[in-house]
């Protein structure tokens, strides 16, 4: 199908002006491609007071989304309750200061997810890839990455009516066939609940602190994936790509053309643009004016968006609807 028939008809490319809070880097999983995790005990948890100081500095700076991104405490650990409460409190704080929280902290229990719905305008969890083969390799010590667990999270989010972001990570040892199966699984779940607002197509990018150390996923492959994803995914799901992981190789003209090739293939969103990419700290996010410089000469228009898409506003609890409404009418 021609992408010009779709939502993507217009030449608008969106991004979300964002800031990331990390409750903790400690994680009981060991995904071998991870440049984020720390050992339990080696990294203090963020305090609500420190978070408040960080957030107050951001007020009136155009930042709208607060991404809560975390390492994980085991579901049966005695520290799980405190970990969850900290996440809840950070969301509540962000909301009370007028920001819009989006939480992505790994798999949750049904009760945890239901409680976080009250303080998040959308939530996220990457499917990564559907194939269980990766449990023998990169996810060998990462029980949170069991594909059925992740699929069930997408299902629960649908049942709870939570606007959701998911995505795939490419270049971690999966096959081409695996790509299409993973995309089809997302399309199928969205068919049931209609809650997936965007799918991130994330190229694995080699970092300095991981143990995997493989070659970053090639851009020619990414363009192919985007094109096919646009055919597999329903048209009301936006395809998101991270510009800092695309815009990295070659000299200037080549870099710009990589990003443009992704847009031509069907990507329409550049995700959260924040001062630091916590997941890929070796790849700083480009400024929005730099992105504009690259894409506008090619006829695209860069526009900021909220972390919840308008058609889901009515799904949100009343308190959240009020904060979202202020952003929609530009009263922030
Ligand atoms: O800056 C980043 N934002 C990430 N985000 C945030 C994303 O770019 C958007 O800001 C949100 O999806 C809101 O629409 C994620 C959100 C998810 O739900 C799942 C995974 C990611 C991954 C990243 C990431 O690697 N870097
Ligand atoms: C938050 C999300 O970031 C992605 N992620 C984790 N490590 C890397 C990496 N080295 N390169 C690209 N993406 C990564 C995973 O898909 C995770 O779910
Ligand atoms: S990718 Fe997420 S789950 Fe895996 S080790 Fe890193 S923080 Fe933990």
Image (tube, helix red, strand yellow):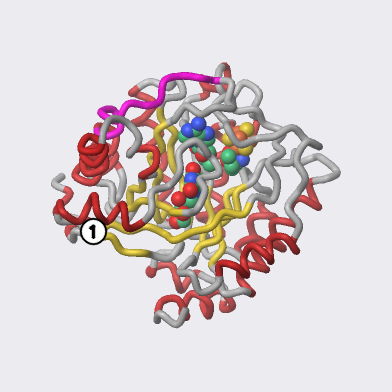
Residue holding disc 1: 7
Q: Residue at x 22, y 52 (%)?
A: 295
Closer-to-camera residue (43/110): 43
Local crowd size for mark 1, using a 10 Å CA cut-off: few (<14), some (14–19), many (≥20): some
Q: Position of residue 77 (x, y in %)?
A: 82, 40
Q: Quadrant of residue 310?
A: bottom left
Asked if residue 234 lies in the magenta stretch, the reply is: no
Q: Residue at x 40, y 33 (%)?
A: 203
Q: The magenta stretch spans which residues? A: 212-223
Tell me: 144 left or right of 193.
right
Q: Is residue 34 above or below residue 328?
A: above
Tell me: 66 left or right of 231.
right
Q: Residue at x 74, y 41 (%)?
A: 73
Q: Position of residue 227 (x, y in %)?
A: 23, 38
Asked if residue 222 lies in the magenta stretch, the reply is: yes
Q: Is residue 198 above or below residue 122?
A: above
């Amino acid at each position: 199908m021609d992408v010009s028939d779709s939502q993507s008809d217009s030449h608008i490319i969106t991004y979300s002006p964002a800031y990331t809070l990390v409750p903790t880097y400690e994680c009981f999983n060991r995904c071998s491609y991870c440049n984020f995790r720390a050992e339990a005990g080696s990294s203090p948890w963020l305090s609500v007071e420190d978070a408040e100081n960080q957030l107050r500095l951001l007020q009136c700076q155009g930042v709208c989304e607060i991404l809560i991104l975390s390492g994980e405490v085991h579901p049966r650990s005695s520290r799980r309750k405190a970990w969850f409460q900290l996440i809840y409190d950070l969301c509540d704080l962000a909301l009370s200061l007028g920001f819009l929280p989006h939480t992505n902290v790994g798999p949750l229990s049904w009760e945890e997810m239901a409680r976080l719905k009250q303080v998040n305008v959308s939530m996220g969890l990457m499917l990564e890839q559907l194939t269980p083969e990766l449990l023998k390799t990169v996810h060998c010590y990462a029980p949170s990455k069991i594909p059925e667990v992740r699929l069930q999270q997408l299902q629960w989010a649908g049942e709870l009516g939570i606007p959701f972001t998911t995505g795939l990570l490419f270049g971690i040892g999966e096959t081409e066939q695996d790509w299409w199966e993973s995309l089809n699984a997302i399309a199928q779940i969205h068919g049931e609940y209609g809650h997936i607002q965007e799918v991130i197509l994330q190229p694995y990018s080699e970092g300095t602190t991981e143990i995997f150390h493989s070659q970053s996923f090639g851009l020619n492959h990414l363009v192919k994936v985007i094109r096919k994803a646009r055919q597999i995914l329903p048209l009301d799901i936006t395809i998101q790509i991270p510009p800092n992981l695309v815009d990295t190789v070659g000299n200037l003209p080549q870099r710009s053309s990589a990003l443009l090739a992704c847009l031509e293939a069907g990507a329409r969103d550049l995700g959260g643009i924040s001062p630091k990419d916590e997941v890929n700290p070796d790849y700083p996010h480009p400024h929005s004016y730099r992105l504009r410089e690259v894409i506008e000469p090619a006829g695209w228009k860069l526009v900021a968006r909220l972390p919840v898409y308008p058609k889901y506003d009515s799904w949100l609890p009343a308190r959240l609807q009020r904060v979202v409404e202020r952003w929609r009418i530009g009263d922030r």
